[in-house]
Each structure stands twice: as structure tokens, then as C-alpha cells.
Image (cartoon, rainbow, N blue to C red):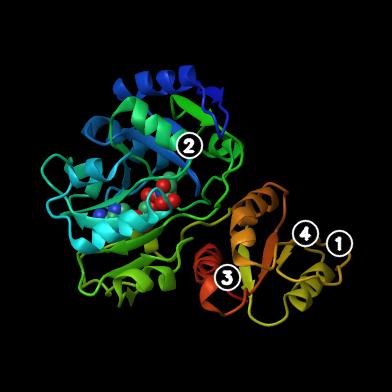
């Protein structure tokens, strides 16, 4: 099936394009659309067969539940069994925005959405195209990131097509997303609440509102599935081996170049170039860096390189989400 591509203004989405996407979604089809974090691969969350197509298109293991996007707090509550005060205050403060909350699901939500589990991940996205699509189609949309499973998330329409062309009915292409990193995921069914995935909304911002939050997740018992399988070590990875330099990235790059390897190098500070290496300098602030990180990794991944060496980002709380994604992208190639 050839993927239909509609270019759509990021601030003032065209109604015709939204109606076309609505028709595809209501017919059980798949629509990739921009959110303020990364592009999502959307299907009607109440249609088990449509959600099953997301898993097939991505090659996603059936054990990994997907996030459901809604337009209003009321629509979120309508899919949950309980709505604690913590959910209400966090929603009021951070929605629409890059915060995903895990809550007990109710019987309206098909099991495939939650990988058979009792909890559901929910968020209201802030991107005008995502929000207006949700309002127009009047459906909750299951939407994981619009990439093949375990690969880099897409921050531009062309990244979606590189990964999923001809596997989805429609792409709403609104250009680059602004946030660039996936949402923060917090499990409100745990006491105290647990941060399952660091993201653009920091732990400190959440703690300022609801108090204590635990970091990470309990190690699963043998044979049990992970509470947030997206936190598996290898995830968000380019196809080119990526290593996170423990010591001097420049020195590691120089070594590899001496061996005649084709090397890409990402740093967060100005560095003297190494002849032969492709060097990209990302912004030294975490927000600016997050906005560009995946696009840079996608570009280096398409450049026919043998190695991507990334300098270790600063070891401070504001860089937590970026350190997390880079550690996963390196998946054992830590230099
Ligand atoms: O920014 C984002 O969150 C993007 C955009 C499209 O909204 N979505 C996204 O979805 O990154 P996905 O499916 O690639 O990542 C969802 C994460 C995974 O780590 C998944 O395991 C976790 O959320 N998750 C989903 N449902 C869960 C649940 N019921 N309990 C615990 N973790 C869950
Ligand atoms: Mg993903």
C-alpha cells in the first residue's frame, strides 16, 4: 500500500487534511502525525484490529504497551478506572504537553493496547496538528513513536517514511517537531509514583507538584514482563554502531580515523576537528540539544559511516533524559 503524504501547517492545520486523516482512522487505518515530542503512529485505540496493525507495522513485540492520546482530561478519565488527585494536578499543570501518566485502565480499552496489563499510559499532546486531529476524529488514538521497533524515533516526516513507507495509510507531515525527545512517563499506580522514562518534563518539575517520586522501575521477577518494556536496554538506536565515549571523545575519534574507519562524532562543546571525521556540535543546553539530537543521529545514520562516537553529556539532572536515550542507543558499545 503506497503511503499518502499530506503536508500540513504546524500552527494552523488544514481542515481538509484533518478530515482525510479522520476518515482513515475511522476505517481502522494507520496515520502518522506530529506531536510536540516525536511523530506518533496513530490508530483508533478502541479498535483492537486497528491497534494490532500498529504492532505489525512497527514489528513491535506484543508485550510492549502503547500510549493513548486524548484531547481532554474528561476523555482520559473515561478510559481509566480511578483518577487520583495526583493525576488531576499533574494533568492541570502539564497537559497538553510531554507528560504520560500510567493509570488503571477500564473495560473500554482493548487488552492489546496495554499488552494485556491492567494499566494504561495516557497523554494530551500539545502539537496543534495532534490536538486538532484528536478533536476532529473524536477518538482516543493509540500512538507509539512512528518508527520500527527499537530504532530511532522520528522528529521529521522523512524519518517516518524512511522507516514505515508503504506500511501505513497516511502521513501528516508538518516538518520538524520542536521537543525532539519522547515524553516523560510516570506510573501513578505505584506508591510513591515512579518515573519510568525521563523526558522533557523533568523529575524536579514533577516533584515540585506531587512530592516524592521514585526513579526507574522494579526489576521484574523471572518470567514476568517488564512494567515498561520500552525501557529495555536496546532502544532508540541508529543502525550504525554508536558508542558513548567514556573519556575523551576526540581522542577516540582520532584513534578510529587512524585505523581508516569512517567516523561520525557528536559533541556538546566546541572541539578542534579531526581530519576525516564528520563532526556535529549540538547545543550545550539540554532543551536545544533534545530538539536536534534525533535528527542529527538520523543524518549520521544515513551517511554510510562505520562508527558514531558521542561525547558523554554532562552528569547533571537536566541532562538525564538525553543521557538515558544515548545510553540505550549505545546498547553495549560504551567506549
Ligand atoms: O512522546 C511520546 O511519548 C511519543 C509520542 C508519539 O506521544 N510516544 C512514544 O510512544 O514514545 P512509545 O510507544 O514509543 O513509548 C511508550 C513508552 C514505552 O516505554 C512503553 O513501554 C511505555 O511508554 N508504556 C506504555 N504503556 C504503558 C503501561 N501501561 N505501563 C507502563 N509503561 C507503558
Ligand atoms: Mg518508541
Task: Identify the mark nearer the N-term, 4 or 2.
Answer: 2
Task: Identify the mark nearer the N-term, 2 or 1.
Answer: 2
Work out whether 24 lies above or below 107. above
Question: Which residue is drawn at the image coordinates 64% and 61% (left, top)?
Answer: 289
Rounded to the nearest angstrom, the CA distance separating label 4 from label 2 is: 40 Å
Rounded to the nearest angstrom, the CA distance separating label 2 from label 1 is: 42 Å
- Find residue 331 and report its horizontal and vertical position in percent: 51, 67
Provide the secondary structure element on which disc 1 rests: loop
- Find residue 154 and report its horizontal and vertical position in percent: 54, 45
Residue projecting furthest to the bottom: 247
280 with respect to 286 (left or right): right
Rounded to the nearest angstrom, the CA distance separating label 3 from label 4 is: 16 Å
**Residue under label 3:** 333
Task: Identify the mark nearer the N-term, 2 or 3.
Answer: 2
Task: Identify the mark nearer the N-term, 4 or 1.
Answer: 4
251 with respect to 95 (left or right): right
**Residue under label 1:** 276
Q: Can you tell which mark lies on residue 76?
A: none
Q: Nearer the viewer, mark 2 or mark 3?
A: 2
Question: Which residue is drawn at the image coordinates 35% and 37% (left, top)?
Answer: 54
Q: Can you tell which mark lies on residue 262?
A: 4
Work out whether 114 lies above or below 2. below
Other residues around mark 4 within 10 Å, as few (<14) / some (14–19) / many (≥20): some
Amino acid at each position: 500500500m503506497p503511503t499518502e503524504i499530506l503536508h500540513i501547517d504546524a500552527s494552523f492545520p488544514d481542515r481538509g487534511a484533518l478530515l482525510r486523516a479522520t476518515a482513515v482512522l475511522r476505517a481502522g487505518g494507520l496515520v502518522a502525525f506530529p506531536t510536540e515530542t516525536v511523530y506518533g503512529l496513530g490508530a483508533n485505540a478502541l479498535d483492537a484490529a486497528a491497534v494490532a496493525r500498529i504492532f505489525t507495522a512497527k514489528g513491535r513485540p506484543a508485550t510492549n504497551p502503547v500510549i493513548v492520546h486524548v484531547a481532554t482530561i474528561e476523555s482520559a478519565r473515561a478510559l481509566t478506572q480511578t483518577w487520583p488527585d495526583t493525576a488531576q494536578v499533574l494533568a492541570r499543570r502539564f497537559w497538553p504537553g510531554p507528560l504520560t501518566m500510567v493509570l488503571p485502565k477500564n473495560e473500554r480499552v482493548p487488552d492489546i493496547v496495554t499488552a494485556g496489563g491492567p494499566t494504561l499510559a495516557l497523554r494530551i499532546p500539545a502539537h496543534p496538528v495532534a490536538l486538532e486531529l484528536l478533536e476532529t476524529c473524536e477518538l482516543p488514538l493509540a500512538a507509539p513513536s512512528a518508527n520500527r521497533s527499537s530504532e530511532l524515533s522520528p522528529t521529521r516526516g522523512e524519518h517516518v517514511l524512511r522507516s514505515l513507507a508503504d506500511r501505513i495509510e497516511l502521513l501528516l507531515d508538518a516538518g520538524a517537531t520542536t521537543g525532539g525527545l519522547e515524553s516523560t512517563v510516570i506510573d501513578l499506580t505505584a506508591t510513591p509514583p515512579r518515573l519510568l522514562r525521563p523526558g522533557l518534563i523533568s523529575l524536579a518539575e514533577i516533584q515540585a507538584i506531587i512530592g516524592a517520586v521514585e526513579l526507574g522501575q522494579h526489576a521484574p521477577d523471572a518470567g514476568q514482563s517488564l512494567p515498561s518494556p520500552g525501557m529495555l536496554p536496546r532502544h532508540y538506536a541508529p543502525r550504525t554502531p554508536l558508542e558513548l565515549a567514556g573519556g575523551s571523545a576526540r581522542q577516540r575519534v582520532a584513534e578510529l580515523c587512524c585505523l581508516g574507519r569512517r567516523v561520525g562524532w557528536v559533541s556538546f562543546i566546541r572541539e578542534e576537528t579531526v581530519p576525516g571525521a564528520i563532526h556535529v556540535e549540538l547545543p550545550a543546553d539540554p532543551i536545544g540539544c533534545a530538539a536536534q539530537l534525533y535528527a542529527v543521529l538520523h543524518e549520521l545514520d544515513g551517511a554510510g559511516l562505520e562508527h558514531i562516537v558521542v561525547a558523554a553529556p554532562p552528569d547533571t539532572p537536566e541532562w538525564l533524559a538525553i543521557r538515558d536515550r544515548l545510553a540505550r542507543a549505545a546498547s553495549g558499545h560504551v567506549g
